[in-house]
Amino acid sequence: MWLDAILAYLHFTAIFLLFAFLTVEVVLIRQPLDMRNLRLLGRMDIWYFASAIGALVTGFARAAFGAKGGDFYFGAWPIYVKIGLFLLVAGISIKPTMTFIRWRRTLEAEPGWQVPAAEQAAMRRLVFIEVHLAALIPVFAVIMSRGLGH
């Protein structure tokens, strides 16, 4: 029981951190992107990635070593929706991550350069899509944890 409680705590903490870092990205991407904000955006993106890995690892650890066991989780469809949504969000996040890196490098090479408004708007849309899709994952977690998907 203690292991299950610890894994649940670590999983929830990773999820809360994931949403915290993603929220900071949402706030930053709406502001003028000078060097300071671009660097901060890059750091938040790294922490967002790390927290996503943490959520993934602790989620699978809960399934493998938690009180309910893998059969409970993997014998029901909601886990596959959760994993699919997670992978979809991860796939979408690649474009903003690569763009943030490119923007920072360009600004370092050309100090007067500014992020094109259309590109910033496009990345803002992608980050918002990430937030909205990620927000669906807990819905399926609730369905799954109640055994409603069996």
Image (cartoon, rainbow, N blue to C red):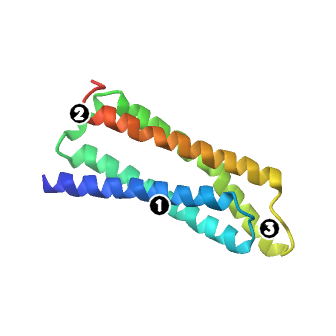
Label 1 vs label 3: CA separation? 25 Å
Amino acid marked by disc 3: Thr
Which sits earlier in the primary sequence, circle 1 or circle 2?
Answer: 1
Amino acid marked by disc 1: Ala
Q: Residue at left 43%, top 59%? A: 17
Q: Residue furthest top?
A: 150
Q: Residue at left 51%, top 64%? A: 47
Which sits earlier in the primary sequence, circle 1 or circle 3?
Answer: 1
Q: Dot 1: what SS? A: helix
Amino acid marked by disc 2: Phe
Q: Residue at left 39%, top 36%? A: 139
- Residue 39 against residue 3 in the figure, above or below: below
- Residue 95 against residue 25 in the figure, above or below: above
**Percent position of residue 72, x then y:** 23, 33
Q: Which numbered marker is on residue 72?
A: 2
Judge left or right: residue 135 versus residue 59: right
Label 1 vs label 2: CA separation? 27 Å
**Percent position of residue 60, x then y:** 32, 47
**Percent position of residue 45, x then y:** 57, 61
**Percent position of residue 96, x then y:** 66, 53
Which sits earlier in the primary sequence, circle 2 or circle 3?
Answer: 2
Counting labels gives 3
Residue 113 visible in the displayed image: yes
Label 2 vs label 3: CA separation? 49 Å
Q: Residue at left 26%, top 52%? A: 8
Residue 86 visible in the displayed image: no
Judge left or right: residue 38 versus residue 81: right
Circles 1 and 2, Cβ within 8 Å, touching? The answer is no
Q: Which residue is mark 1?
A: 50
Disc 1 crowd rating (10 Å Cα; few below 14, some 14-19, many 20+) is some
Q: Which numbered marker is on residue 106?
A: 3
Q: Dot 3: what SS? A: helix
